[in-house]
């Protein structure tokens, strides 16, 4: 059974090397990150309305 698992894993690694699967969720942000929130908060704290 261990040999079968190793062969299966080797086949998956080889296929991923030759033709990688594209998963956009690994590469793109889903929204603004924490740095954007800190930057916006600091901008609003500097602006005062009279």
Image (cartoon, grey):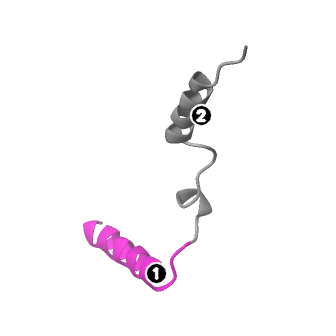
The residue identified by callout 2 is 40
Q: Quadrant of the C terminus?
A: top right
Q: Is residue 25 above or below residue 2?
A: above
Helix, strand or loop at mark 2: helix
Q: Position of residue 27 (x, y in %)?
A: 54, 61
Nearer to me, 44 or 13: 44
Q: Quadrant of the N terminus?
A: bottom left
Q: Position of residue 10 (x, y in %)?
A: 34, 77
Residue 21 sits in which quadrant?
bottom right
Q: Is residue 14 left or right of residue 42?
A: left
Q: Is residue 19 left or right of residue 1?
A: right
Q: Given the current orientation, which residue lies at the most extreme left position?
A: 2
The residue identified by callout 1 is 15
The answer to whether residue 14 is magenta is yes
Q: Given the current orientation, which residue lies at the most extreme right position?
A: 50
Magenta-tinted stretch: 2-21
Q: Position of residue 33 (x, y in %)?
A: 54, 42
Helix, strand or loop at mark 1: helix
């Amino acid at each position: 059974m261990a040999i079968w698992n190793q062969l299966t894993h080797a086949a998956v690694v080889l296929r991923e090397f030759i033709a990688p699967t594209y998963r956009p969720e690994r590469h793109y942000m889903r929204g603004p990150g924490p740095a954007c929130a800190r930057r916006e908060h600091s901008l609003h704290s500097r602006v005062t309305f009279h």
